[in-house]
Amino acid sequence: MTTPSDPPTARSGPRAEHVVPARTLLATAAALLALTALTVAASRLDLGAVNAVVALAIACAKASIVALFFMHLLYERRFPRVILVASALFAALFVAFVVFDTTQYQPDLRAREAQAPPPAR
Amino acid sequence: MTAPALDRAVPAAPRPRFLAGHFEDLGAQTETAQLGIWLFLGSEILFFGGLFTAYGVYRANHLELFRYAHHFLDWRLGALNTVVLIGSSLSAAWSVRCAQLGQRRGLRATLLVTLLLAAAFMAVKYLEYSHKLHHGVGWGASCHPDAEILGELPAALRAVPVPARLGTFFAVYYLMTGLHGIHVLAGMGLYLWLLARARRGDFGPEYWAPVDTVALYWHLVDMIWIFLFPLFYLIG
Amino acid sequence: MIGALHRTALAAAGFMPERASSVAAGVDRVFLFVLWLSAFFFALIVALTVLFVLRYRRRPSRAEPEPSPSHDARLELFWTAVPLALVFVLFGVSTRTYLRMVEPEPGRDPLRIQVMARRWSWWFDHPGGRGAPELHVVRGRPAELVLASADVIHSLYVPDFRLKQDAVPGRFTRMAFTPVLAGTFPIVCAEYCGTDHSRMAARVVVHPDQASFDAWANEGAAPAASLVDLGRTVFASKGCAGCHSVDGSPRVGPSFKNLWGRQEKLAGGGTARVDEDYVRESILRPSAKVVEGFANVMPPVPLEERELQGVIAYLQSLGEAP
Amino acid sequence: MIPAARAAEPAGAPAESYLAHGRGPRAWLLTLDHKRIGVMYLVVITLALLLGGVFALVLRLNLWRPGGGLVSNDTYNKLFTLHGAVMIFLFVIPGIPAALGNFVLPLQLGAKDVAFPRVNLLSFWLYAIGATLFVAVLAVGGVDTGWTLYPPYSLEDARGLGILLALAAVFVAGFSSILTGVNFIASIHRLRAPGMGWFDLPLFLWALYATGVIQIIATPVLGITAAMGFMDRLFHLGLFMPEYGGDPVLFQHFFWFYSHPAVYIMILPAMGIVSEVVSVFSRKPIFGYRYIAMSSIAIAVIGFFVWGHHMFVSGQSRWTNLVFSFLTLLVAIPSAIKTFNWLATMYKGAIDLRTPMVYVLSFFAIFGVGGLTGLFLGALATDVPLHDTYFVVAHFHFVMVGAVLTAFLAGLHYWWPKMTGRMYGEGMARLAAALVFVGFNVTFVPQFFAGVAGMPRRYATYAPAFLGWNRASTVGAFVLALGMGLALGGLLASLRSGRRAPANPWGAASLEWTTPSPPPHENFEATPRPTGPYDFTGLRRVSDEAGWIRVPAEAAP
């Protein structure tokens, strides 16, 4: 009995291998260079805490462009996207939890340091 | 329900040279390789994620230190390296295209360009590291910047005494850029290997999975640098 | 019925430490709540397992299973929802008690005590200046401890108070409680800290009233009259007692009993006589001369000149080498 | 059509078994065959178990008297450190996934091998190097930091070379684990037999999938933590050492971000085995397949955000404590779901008390205790007094040793005929199972009481008040060792004297039982056509020698 509707397994799937067009590649690189220039320019302005936000936002935009076009995520199945987003999310949550906790107890570190500074090097 | 095992017609065509025994065809093998490298890249993100956490913790709690210390880094060199890596990513992506289209000369050329740009990146990194280490800007307990490098700081900072924890900033800096540098070196090794195989004529429209998986890895290395550059060179 | 069982269990739990702080009873209530919850579910699991094995065991008359559904969304939703509800209840009950465990009781002026942990001893600086290797508090008066560590992580654990807090080097941590029973209770170290971790013990003395505490705090309040007294205080407060006994029993370091004038065999060969210079060197640069048979683990102890003299006088008072 | 049972007797010309395919050490040590790699893992893992077990017995003997005295305090500290490190990194974490998983996963998928056989071999060798480094730690005098490696204690100069080797070992073993996870997930995605959908996977594979997610996401953080510790120790970077301006609590965050999910790396595959065995030996489809599969994924995801419950008294801030306490308690729910689904599977079944099933029944009791005592440690109010006492020791031994070990033994006995082609003696195996159960409980139940009474963990000596609990525990440890010895002895004896195993000795429906025992090098003689993994209709028992065969049922529903 053959079942033509079998999911793809050890054989190749229905996804045609996608050759990324040359123009797309060039446009991607151009966009990345432009964003690099933008982030450098933005850092020259003194915006206080906003500087960090702007820099991170631009970096995220650049990373997304790399992932979508250079890493051809745009043409992939869903699963690689899930992997990338999930691991970035877990990493972000890890950073968030730990930074949150350490800023909470920072005064106790400062107070102790004021009382007994670490030995001079 | 059918019986558990049914014989299937054995394909008559000879098996392609690079097809492993447990796959039916090269397309399946390529897709599996891509899936595997994506999983590995997910792991890499968390690997760097640990260091990003360290960065976040020390920056959140020692903001002044980070603001001060990032002036030791030359953003022009950082930007140059960013451009170099973007270029190498472009040529890496192009090499995949060449392999898929069977353009053998183009493949060899793009692989070589990627390799050379990676080497250029490491050369710039070497200049940066050696400049700092030469002037006593080491990591942790061995961070004692000398007068010359302090003189290169913006005038407003020269008046400020050197903060006690400067070495912590540089510990994070050297760990993150160093681990990234190790990844670049590993990438260079992989591109050498690809180049050798490309010269042998291994790759073509049927078999290009190694070119693609190495390129995916290379783009991740680029992506990490895209974050390191502003975090260290621009906002401090 | 459950209430009666509950009280019986409470009374029978004789192996539990005393409930000597104001939060201990609350902690035990949460403990028993979880205990009953767990006991119920454990009994359910075991009972169902045994019942099913007995009833549905495979035997000649029962070669095949009876037909029964392979899933049941309502049933599964039921045993998802019940644990979920219980989790909310448990979190609420436990958190209410926990928030009382980390804040000093409001109202009365708390007794503030500085704690210094080091390998392998405790030192408690009480208000009014008296320091001691044991913790003194007053029944009914809130106490607030600020913990620090001189070397590695330790953890101050008083089982009878149901309280525990790590002392972390490089920072302060805090602990608050109100003792409700007078008496003495053991303090142990609960965070692994090396060789004598299991011997890093002290005790907490709960005075029945403030007057008793004040009497203790003021005795010997005058600045150390003699050098020997000063040395004894230094010996206790700098943690020397963690490794060096004064009764001849072996610890991590050599005992100080009958030490003065002894010829010590050194680890690298050679000998040294215990005199003023040797003691001074061994305190300020311990690794210079290590006695054979002991590990080179002592940290340098920076003492002032008068403190050094005090320690020397104290060592002399412990007897000379035979 | 090939009746599955035919292969039990070497009639005709069946493919030679994987055991006979290539001889000599090279054919084993450099093999790409997942089955051989699984067997090699099994051998090394068993050696690690024996080593860790011997350490445990010495520890228990030292605690026979309150003052200790059998070994010095320092030696005791080194022994418990290596006991923990060897058991966790070399036995419990790789035990089920790397040894049994490697052997079973492609067979259950109906594949010829894992997706990346060379990576699989690399993974084994990384593991072997990690194990060697741990042994090297012993050779340079050991470390006494506890397996948790908390700085500043662990990174002081006095710890010497041992700590550097131990960190390197952790790093290398971690990478072995990551590569295994990558391989398993890719295999499950890509190498399912034709016609096998996601919800036709045996639940063991769902469990390995969830495990793989944790291995890929959590283990790299362990790697970077070990690397940071290594560098901090060598160059005094001031990351974790307060002496140089670092924060030791930060290390604990890093360490537990891996090491708590690692508990689920251990327990999820164990749950997978239980799901297989309970269904096969009740002769009923697993109850609520999708619920069990999804609860594995839920455990894997929630399990990432509970690490802070190891740090409730370590100086972590109060609000962080509250968040972690709540998330920790949530893990109880998928665990409860699984337990009730297993029980419901037995309902109205035809329960066959073979050895694997006996182990699984003891798993129910032990995992019940282990899971429920976790509630005491997830709830803040009770965790504060119980943290770092013997209550914790007992709790995690119930989960990590009791539950995982019994499931490991269940799986080992279940797949042993497939791996070796031999049947073990039921009588001795069941006696061993009973001894393991009794010995385990006598060892660890008293430790709950000692913990509630206030005995801290990692104590080489203790107050005389705790004498009774400790003596009982020591006696139990030897009963447990006896049971383990008997179980291993019974299995090894079967290699010589065991009766030949049929292809399907248990009447199981998943694909590994459709190929001969032991399987041929290529796993299957023809591409298998999966039935449902728990579809027992049509399976008929022929005899002990021929096992079970699937009778083609015309009237199949």
Image: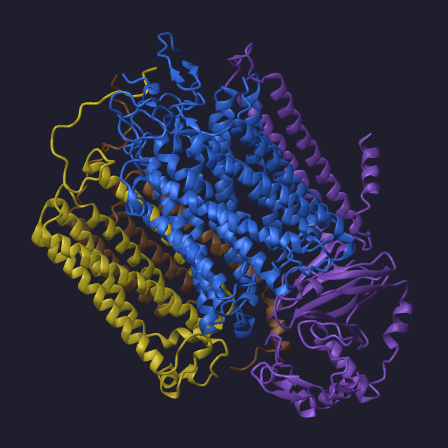
Residue A17: percent from left, percent from top = 19, 39
Q: Is residue C115 above or below residue A69?
A: below
Instruction: Identify the residue at the far top of this view.
Output: D555
The residue positioned 24% from the left and 71% from the top of the image is B123
Q: Which of these two is toward me, D491 or C15?
A: D491
* Residue at position x 61%, y 54% in the image: D58
Chain A: its colour in the image is brown
Asked whether residue D270 is in view, the answer is yes
Q: Which residue corresponds to the image point at 22% horizontal and 40% vertical from the top-left?
A: B20
Q: Which chain is blue?
A: D
Q: Position of residue B44 (x, y in %)?
A: 36, 54
- Residue drawn 32% across and 29% down? D110
Please provide percent x and percent y for residue D168.
43, 61
* Placement of the N terminus of chain C among the 4 image quadrants: top right
Q: How many marks?
A: 0
Q: Nearer the viewer, residue D303 or C67?
A: C67
Q: Is residue C120 left or right of residue B223?
A: right
Image coords of residue D226 (percent x, y)? 45, 61
Image quadrant assignment for residue B172: bottom left
Query: Is residue C274 toward the left or the right of residue B35 in the image?
Result: right
Q: C19 left or right of D455?
A: right
Task: Identify the chain drawn in purple.
Answer: C
**Residue D360, visible in the rendered structure:** no
Q: Quadrant of the C terminus of chain C?
A: bottom right
Quarter-wise, where is residue C3 in the image? top right
Q: Nearer the viewer, residue C316 or B155?
A: C316
**Which chain is displayed in yellow in the rendered image?**
B
